[in-house]
Image (cartoon, rainbow, N blue to C red):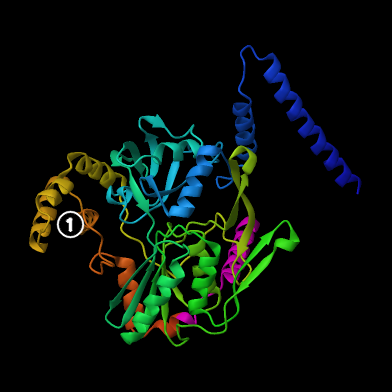
Amino acid sequence: MAAAQGKEQDTKQYTSMLQTVFEFIRSHYVEEVDAKALYEGAMTGMFNALGDPYSTFLPESEMSDLSENVIQGSYGGVGLYISKPTGEQPDGRLPYVEVASPIEDTPGWRAGIQPGDLIIEINGESTDTLTMDDVLARLKGSPGVEVRLLIRRGAKLEFPVSITRAVIEVPTVKQAMIGDIGYLRLISFSAMTVDRAREAVENFKRQNYRSLILDLRNNYGGLLMSAVNIGDLFLDGGVVVSVKSRVASENTVFNARKTTPVSADIPIVVLINRGSASASEIVAGALKDRGRAYLVGEKSFGKGSVQQVYPLNSLNSGFKITTARYYTPSDVNIDKIGIPPDREVRFPEFTAEDAEKLSLLIIANRIPAFVEANPQATAAQVDSLARELNGEYQLDVNLLRRLIRDEQNRTVIAPVYDLDYDVQLQEAVNILRGGSYGALMRTTKTLKTLQEEADVENDTALAS
């Protein structure tokens, strides 16, 4: 009781001191100070002190943009989901902006920006000293305006990218059949995602699908209830996700309905990568913990928190704050940890030497120039260019073919899938067609079990 009273006294003292300093600055600073500027500075400082990149003060301009995005479903920007660490990093790295994922068919995606890329500069200004609001203010804005970025990929590869802002309309769902496999790609979790996904499932049924691939790669999330309702498509009752807050009355467990449009005898493989975050991880975690799907790809991003936006109506500003964390059905929070796939499949990574060669190739602009000059290039022409570049830059021919294909896809609306070059999708198809799915599912473990095993390994390593 005494401790609680002491905390309350501290709170009153701090808030009183804030008011005192606010008035002192207004009265005694050498120049007249705008009260609004002091207010916004104090609010920004409070949220920065949380050390949480997802909690931030929203000045009037940001609240206006947010309202427009929610109502209209679009905004002017480059089409990148980003995150930015706050403060000094433990490994000494500067807190540059990191790309979580590009939004498909947007300028950022067409420019070839990838998950994990760092944005070092925006219009010649280093991003390490910018706040998240500063970064968004520079990336978003009027369509048709060019934004110059300096991108760092890996340890050594750096290259400039010029992107012209466009109206960004976030897509939700893509679907196709791969033989008798239904392929469902969720690009984001919006109010329309569930309806579009249901339509896709009904289409798969009409085409007598026998299994399903749910592609959540580079899906940075969206609405919590959209993720819960997507879980309804695959789970017959039971927990999808639970949300836990400091306020006990706000704790909630979300359960799936007892009926599901996807029959329990339909095998499911889920594709994830480091661009899969938040709502994507809710769905992937639920299907994994409930033994309903086999996960293929790379460890997911690791965003296990829930944010709410609160308007401050009298000042037309507001704030976004993390109010809770979500937990998978086995009661695990994956924040800053991510979800590991049951089978890891990675795309080939560049060596330091490859990065330097690739940097020269990018600067030379050979591949974009080829695609622009040959919009209908045949497979033979692509192969010829790949071999020519292999001779000049000593890069792997298959890698060069994939880079050319990626560039071709960026100049048009991308195909729903690319089975020739997508090694993760290839593996999912092989699992579903090879007859090993049932045996593989019997070997999967819940996230809770994996976490407990990791804790034991860590304890053993420390003891030794």
**Residue underneath mark 1:** 397
Query: In this view, which residue lies farthest toward the top?
Result: 30
Can I make out residue 50 in this image?
Answer: no
Horizontally, residue 361 falls left or right of residue 292, namely left
Residue 188, horizontal then vertical, whole percent: 43, 61
Which region is colored magenta?
Answer: 441-464
The image position of residue 356, as x and y in percent, is 26, 41
As drawn, is 60 to the left or to the right of 217?
right
Majority SS type along the magenta span: helix
Residue occupying the point 30% across, 83% down = 180
* Quarter occupied by the C terminus: bottom right
Is 369 on the left or on the right of 20, as rendered?
left
Q: Position of residue 145 (x, y in %)?
A: 31, 37
The residue positioned 25% from the left and 69% from the top of the image is: 419
**Circle 1: element type:** helix
Tell me residue 403's x, y (percent).
22, 54
Q: Is residue 4 magenta?
A: no
Q: In front here: 383 or 458? A: 383
